[in-house]
Image: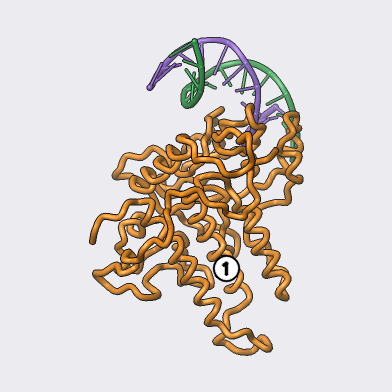
Chain colours: A orange, B green, C purple
DNA sequence: ATGATTTGACCTGA
DNA sequence: TCAGGTCAAATCAT
């Protein structure tokens, strides 16, 4: 197959990923009652919905290279499910947050900071590549501390958003290497990014050309994807699907297009109600990757209007 | 020169 | 009091 660049592959993977989930959702008859065993459960639909939204967000983020709509959209997805008849148990380990205007408060108190949404991801690195730790999201972090934790074999590292002082972005993350499996890093994020990820707010709203810094982030992401990693989202309470607010993560084999082995993609857990997320579920067969023969109906390098709430504030 | 990281000191909440 | 989280001066990297 002709070499397709990483960005295209990732985009295709995400779009196909979302499409698969959407198809499953579509194929599921809406149950008149809760009796049929062939129908997806509400939890399964919820997971599918998250999957769809997540995939499209990731694809959009790759294309736009800009902001991060994920949390808002995750909340929307949860709302949609809730409105369809069931109030889901929180599928994302995010605690309620103060509203967004507080995120821009340069004098946000430590108490308020503690109320910022918090969630955890487990990131597996490839030890043979000599990777020290996860460097795996599009955001720009500055390390501000490291601490030995009682009973933990490895120290915990503390990072904050690079744009904390310039854009009052209060997002932080902690990285803790797992005692049991040193190839796994537990990354705890706190707070949504309110920054524009290095892009100075444009003088005119929208219609902005992508800045070189964004390209760098995307290149970084692609490099990381090449060198890294598999993300496990199976460590969460119950069988919830995690909604990372940060960059998309992939297993290496997904990116290289080899799905013949069962193709893990993002959610590789087997404990959840669904194990459909691998791309083998549809029109892939061993030894071939027909999904890569799809034409791009648009210019993937073009800036697009995502329609999501943005960080391009006045 | 500038920005990032390191690391001991300090702060805070349980 | 102590563990976890943050600050900030010193140091390092570019």
Residue wearing tag 1: A47
- From what the image shows, is residue A166 above or below residue A297? above
| Front one among C12 and A45 | A45
Count of numbered tags: 1
Residue found 29% across the figure and 67% down from its top: A289
Place residue A111 in its image quadrant: top right
Residue found 73% across the figure and 71% down from its top: A83
Residue found 63% across the figure and 28% down from its top: A166
Place residue A98 in its image quadrant: top right
Query: Pointer 1: residues within 10 angstroms few (<14), some, or many (20+)?
Result: many
Q: Is residue A177 left or right of residue A149?
A: left
Label 1 residue SS: helix
The x and y percentages for residue A179 are 46, 45
The x and y percentages for residue A163 are 59, 31
Q: Is residue A29 left or right of residue A178?
A: right
Q: Which chain is mark 1 on?
A: A
Residue A42 can be seen, yes or no? yes
Residue A275 can be seen, yes or no? no
Q: Which quadrant is home to the C terminus of chain A? A: top right
The x and y percentages for residue A175 are 52, 40
- From what the image shows, is residue A163 above or below residue A253? above
| Front one among A204 and A85 | A204
Residue found 30% across the figure and 43% down from its top: A129
Q: Which quadrant is home to the N terminus of chain A? A: bottom left
């Amino acid at each position: 197959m002709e070499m397709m660049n990483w960005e295209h592959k990732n985009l295709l993977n995400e779009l196909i990923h979302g499409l698969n989930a959407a198809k499953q959702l579509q194929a599921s008859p809406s149950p008149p009652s809760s009796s049929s065993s062939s129908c997806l459960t509400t939890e399964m639909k919820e997971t599918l919905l998250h999957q769809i939204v997540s995939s499209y967000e990731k694809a959009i983020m790759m294309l736009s290279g800009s902001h991060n709509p994920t949390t808002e959209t995750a909340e929307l997805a949860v709302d949609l499910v809730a409105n369809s008849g069931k109030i889901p148990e929180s599928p994302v380990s995010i605690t309620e947050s103060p509203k967004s205007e507080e995120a821009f408060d340069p004098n946000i108190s430590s108490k308020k900071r503690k109320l910022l949404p918090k969630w955890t991801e487990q990131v597996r690195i490839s030890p043979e590549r000599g990777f020290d730790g996860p460097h795996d999201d599009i955001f720009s972090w500055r390390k501000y501390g490291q601490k030995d934790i009682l009973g933990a074999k490895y120290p915990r590292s503390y990072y904050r958003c690079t744009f904390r002082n310039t854009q009052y972005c209060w997002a932080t993350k902690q990285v803790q290497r797992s005692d049991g499996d040193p190839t796994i890093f537990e990354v705890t994020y706190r707070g949504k990014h309110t920054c524009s990820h290095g892009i100075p707010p444009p003088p005119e709203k929208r219609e902005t050309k992508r800045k070189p810094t964004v390209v760098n982030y995307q290149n970084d992401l692609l490099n990381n994807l090449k060198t890294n990693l598999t993300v496990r989202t199976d460590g969460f309470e119950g069988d919830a699907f995690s909604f990372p607010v940060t960059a998309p993560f992939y297993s290496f084999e997904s990116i290289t297009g080899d799905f013949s082995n069962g193709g893990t993609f993002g959610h590789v857990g087997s404990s959840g109600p669904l194990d459909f997320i691998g791309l083998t579920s549809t029109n892939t067969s061993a030894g071939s990757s027909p999904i890569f023969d799809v034409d791009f109906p648009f210019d993937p390098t073009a800036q697009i209007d995502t329609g999501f709430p943005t960080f391009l504030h006045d």
